[in-house]
Amino acid sequence: MGYEFKIGLRYLFSRKRKKFISFMSLISIVGVGVGVASLITVLAVMDGFGYELRSRIVGQSPHILIEKEGGIDRDSYQDISSAIGSIKSVRGSYPFIWGQGVLRSRSRTHGVVIKSIDQKNETDLSKIKKNLYAGELKLADSNIILGKELSIALGAFIGDEIEVVTSLMAKPRKFRVSGIFNSGMYEYDLNLAYISLDNASVLFKMEGIVTGIGVELDRIDSAASTKKLIRKNIPEIYYVRTWMDLNRNLFAALKLEKIAMFVILILIVIVAALNIISTLTVMVTEKTKDIGILKSLGATQNMIMVIFSTQGLVIGFLGSVTGLLGGLGLSFILGYFRFPILPETIYYGINYLPVRVDIMDSFIIMASALLISFIASLYPAYQASRLEPVDALRYE
């Protein structure tokens, strides 16, 4: 440890005299710590919202969609399924039909998206199985599965009979409610219903063809790379879109909000950095005699700058560590207790503060705090280095 560092620490945490300087140093550390803790906590909550939202959206939609204008022949589905089945990241695929319709129960009506489920395809079944809230997964004959909120809106529950109307049907068709699902996402639970693939082909006049093919992956993060591989394995007449393509605007907005929040909250650290400037400026004034003595003994301008800039780094480091521990602790408390602060209808069925700490974000925040603290210390350190021994000791 160089003597410059030792002197810097001694000046920063003076115990005998100039207690005011030590108090200002403590305030500077607390200021940096509060800024870092705020950044870590807020970005953890925003990452948590993004992760929860992504999980709920992907939980009801295919990871990758393969479609063609006019629909895909069911015979062609087998060829496409074989072509993409050799890709390692692909867990399975299934054909689907979906369209819009109106559900009527007693005197209540509600417009919904009607989606098919192929009961012979385990990949397709697995997506609804994990969200089945009540009843059974039986779609044979004329059975239908409703979302929890849709069931409440229609007043239709297990065993009740409802009518389904589409723009392609001359008269309503009756279905019996066999199950209710709860995805945890209010918009889906209110506006989505499932029927069998055969019934969907009749409702939407799509005998022999399907709307598209859904592809499930082992990891949803591999959607973009898998899309490129699928694109190489199937003809150009097919459209291939990932879950990210379908929700691009939403997740782009979340990313922009995260960046904006980082910029806004970093101002807290900058305010703390201004406190560092004032602390070191006062310290330079108080240590004028010491600076003169050090220069008389042969200390160079660079050495004096290192002494005072070291103090800015130490304040930044201690504040960053304090803020890191505080931010992680607060994030843990928010994630553990899941305080119910939002109605489910406001933000995609998420009624609590979800928390997901990103290690890279925490590293960037700490690095930013250290850099800002170091920059804040340069001006007072430069001013100290310019003092001449004669001027410093003239009145001593």
Image: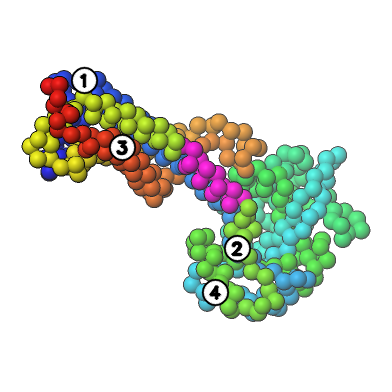
Name the residue beneath numbered marker 1: 19
Q: CA distance from mark 2 to mark 3?
A: 51 Å
Closer-to-camera residue (357/213):
357
Q: CA distance from mark 4 to mark 3?
A: 55 Å
Closer-to-camera residue (321/148):
321
Query: How packed is label 3: few (under 14 Cα within 10 Å), some, or many (20 or more)?
Result: some
Callout 2 secondary element: strand
Magenta-colored span: 250-265
Query: Which quarter of the image is occupied by the C terminus?
Result: top left
Question: From this viewpoint, is residue 284 visible?
Answer: yes
Which dot, 2 or 3, sits closer to the camera?
3
Name the residue beneath numbered marker 3: 379
Q: Which mark is residue 242?
A: 2
Contact, mark 3 vs mark 1 (Cβ under 8 Å): no
Residue 27 in the image: above or below residue 54: above
Of the image marks 1 and 4, the number of the one nearer the N terminus: 1
Query: How packed is label 4: few (under 14 Cα within 10 Å), some, or many (20 or more)?
Result: some
- Is residue 263 one of those drawn in magenta? yes
- Is residue 223 one of those drawn in magenta? no
Amino acid at circle 3: Tyr
Q: Which mark is residue 229?
A: 4
Residue 140 in the image: above or below residue 145: below
Which dot, 4 or 3, sits closer to the camera?
3
